[in-house]
Every structure is written in C-alpha cells, then in structure tokens.
Image: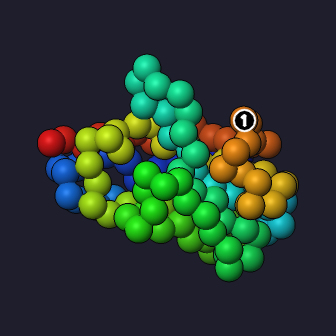
C-alpha cells in the first residue's frame, strides 16, 4: 500500500510558485525526519530539503535556500514544500521521503528509508 503520497506538482511560469504536499501513512511519521528530493531528466537525484521530527529544525540545498520552505503538520501526517521564485532549473520530479536518522545528516544521504511516487514540477521560461 502507498505509504508516502506526494501531490501538488504542475506547470508554472518562471517566477511563479507551487506548494507540494505529502501524506504519510507511516506509523513512525511523528518521530521521523521528513524531506524532499528531486530528479530531473538525465540528472542525478538531488536533495532539496529536510525537516526534523518536531518541525523546529530544517535544512536546504543551496540551490533552493531562500526560495523554498519545508514544513510539517504532525497532527495530519503531512509535510509541505512551498516553492517560490521558481525557475526552469527546478523542473524535476519531486519526491517526499521519510528517514529515521537525524535531519542533519540527510543532505548527504545516498538513500532514504522510504520515499513515495513523485510529483512532476515543470517550470517554463
């Protein structure tokens, strides 16, 4: 069964915004770090953002810092990614993930405990 389900992607013009959401059915949601990574066609997977279990700590890839904001609602088992000032370089399938490790180590992780089907973000120039 689906454990992480992302949605909210779409086509947007450069400079626009999108808000991605991810619903989790994992019983470990409230204790796990959560985050987003993305993969563009022909490119390697790229870490985007992570948030700790409480939502009080976050980290971001340099490429999105200041433009993207990750948040979570532990009461609803949801995480979100607010993406502003989008550019064509943000075009990719965006995936949410869950991991038992500290959010601090996740930017350099080569894999994650769980990830779901992605949602496609396309930014036109």
The residue located at (20%, 58%) in the rendering is 15
Query: Which residue in the structure is indicated by mark 1?
Result: 110
Q: How many marks?
A: 1
> Residue 121 placed where, x, y %?
36, 43
Above or below 77: residue 54: below
Relative horizontal placement of residue 42, taking residue 31 as reference (left or right): left
Above or below 11: residue 42: above
Question: Farthest residue toward the front?
Answer: 62
Residue 47 lies in what quarter of the image? top right
Q: Which image quarter is the N terminus in? A: top right
The residue located at (54%, 39%) in the rendering is 46
Q: Nearer the viewer, residue 88 or 24?
A: 88
Q: Nearer the viewer, residue 47 or 120?
A: 47
Residue 91 lies in what quarter of the image? top left
> Residue 88 placed where, x, y %?
26, 41
The residue located at (33%, 59%) in the rendering is 18
Please tell me whether mark 1 sits on a helix, a strand or a loop: loop
The residue located at (42%, 31%) in the rendering is 40
Relative horizontal placement of residue 121, taking residue 73 as reference (left or right): left
> Residue 86 placed where, x, y %?
29, 54
Residue 26: tell me if it is visible. Answer: no
Q: Which image quarter is the C terminus in? A: top left
Q: Nearer the viewer, residue 74 or 45?
A: 45
Q: Residues within 10 Å of mark 1 (few under 14, many from 20)?
A: few
Question: Farthest residue toward the top?
Answer: 42
Q: How is the image coloured?
A: rainbow
Residue 104 lies in what quarter of the image? bottom right
Residue 52: tell me if it is visible. Answer: yes
Above or below 112: residue 61: below
């Amino acid at each position: 069964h689906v454990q992480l389900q992302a949605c909210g992607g779409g086509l947007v013009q450069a400079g626009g915004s999108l808000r991605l959401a991810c619903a989790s059915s994992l019983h470990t949601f409230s204790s796990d770090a959560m985050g987003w990574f993305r993969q563009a066609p022909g490119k390697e997977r790229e870490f985007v953002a992570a948030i700790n279990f409480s939502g009080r700590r976050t980290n971001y890839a340099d490429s999105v810092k200041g433009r993207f904001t990750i948040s979570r609602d532990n009461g609803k088992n949801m995480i979100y990614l607010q993406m502003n000032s989008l550019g064509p370089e943000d075009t990719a399938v965006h995936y949410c993930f869950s991991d038992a490790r500290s959010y601090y180590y996740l930017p350099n992780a080569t894999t994650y405990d769980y990830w779901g089907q992605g949602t496609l973000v396309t930014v036109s120039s």
